[in-house]
Image (cartoon, coloured by chain):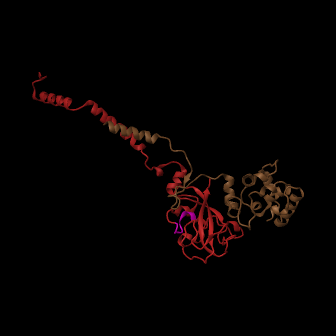
Amino acid sequence: MKWLLGCCTLLLCCTAAPAPADTGTNVPDAVTRKSGLRLTPMSRPSQLYAANCQGCHGETGVSVAEIPPLAGRIGYFVRVPAGRAYLMQVPNVALNPNSDRAIAEMMNWVLTTFSRAQLPEDFRPYSAEEVGRLRRERIDVKARRGQIVEELVAEHEIPSADWLAY
Amino acid sequence: MKPISRTGFDRWMEHMSRRTAQRTSRRGFLSLCGGWVVATTALPLLPVSRRAQAADPHEKALAARKFASEFANKAQTTDPTRCDYWRYCSSDGYLCACCGGGPNVCPPGTSPSPTSWIGSCINPDDGKTYLIAYRDCCGQDSCGRCACLGEEGDMPSYRPQVNNDIVWCFGASSMVYHCSSAALVGLAE
């Protein structure tokens, strides 16, 4: 009899014990189930970057030669007003179906994650209002980029145009 | 021992009562009752699956397979060589898993494209949304096995960054398409 009571008590204790701490999701999948791979949810801006930019620009902001790297570079653009506007006027940002707020969050995340060292000291994050205003303008991307790089060189923000060669 | 009564019935009753008192244990009876009380209350607490009765809408959707995605409602997570494997919700092309590779491994002789388009699929087993990179394997002629067409999130080709008709071999050593793989990028939401 005692063993039965003991078992019952043990069962009660087991079912009442707190669940183990959540360390992400083990992806239920034929390939990953065995590996025990666990994933934690991505932050909203990094998710937006992954779904809209990462395919070409790469997970770490660096990709193949045909695609301009973001890592260690994109921050320079924010040093002049025209460059700050340019980041919102490149076609896939300007025409992106996401909200101004979501794009502001995403671009602030990209700048501080991939290019913090290149940001100006007085860097202000983009606001939703600013994004909405800036991305209404359509530009000739290649010509505008050339002008901005020249301006950055003239203002001694970068040593030469090669720093931001395409 | 002096009998209480002389009648046969009384004697019989007395005999039975004394026998019961001598041969059974009150504590044993009590513990048996207690055991039953605890066991019957503890049994419903056992960790059995009660997913179908759960009130949580997420759990309900999981049990009934009613996701926002038609593809996920019919998808499976065990066989990457079939079109209804959950990661292929937006895949258009030949499955690398049927061509000597895996769902996220290129077959020998081909190389993964450094660029891809990224979509998202719901895993029907946990109901969560995962970001998936549709990475083409390039460098050999078309594989030709397991042609699948998933169209979730696919946009017309004037939105090329989210179009799956395009050969995504940009930046690869060769623009010749062989098959499509689907690599996990991360967990959304």
Q: Residue furthest front?
A: A159
Residue B136 showing in the rendered view: yes
The residue furthest bottom is B141
Residue appearing at x 31%, y 34% in the figure:
B31
Residue at (87, 62) in percent of width and height: A147
User: Does residue B36 appear in this view?
Assistant: no
Left or right? Give the position of A128 relative to B129.
right
Q: Residue furthest top?
A: B2
**Where is residue B93 shown, x and y percent of the image?**
60, 72
Choose top left, top right, bottom left or bottom right for residue A80: bottom right
Q: Position of residue B184 (x, y in %)?
A: 59, 60
Examine the rendered structure and indicate whether residue A10 appears above or below residue B161: above
Tell whether position B82 is magenta.
Answer: yes
Residues in magenta, as a range? B80-87
Left or right of A79: which side holds A67? Answer: left
Rendered shade, chain A: brown
Q: Magenta region, mostly helix, strand or loop?
A: loop
- The percent position of residue A3, horizontal first and vertical second, equals 33, 38
Which quarter of the rendered picture does the N terminus of chain B lie within?
top left
Residue drawn at 81 percent across, 62 percent down: A164
Q: Nearer the viewer, residue A95 or B168?
A: B168
Q: Color used for chain B? A: red
Give residue A78's position: percent from left, percent from top: 81, 54
Q: Quadrant of residue B94?
A: bottom right
Q: Is residue A57 magenta?
A: no
Residue in front for this viewpoint, A46 or A63: A63
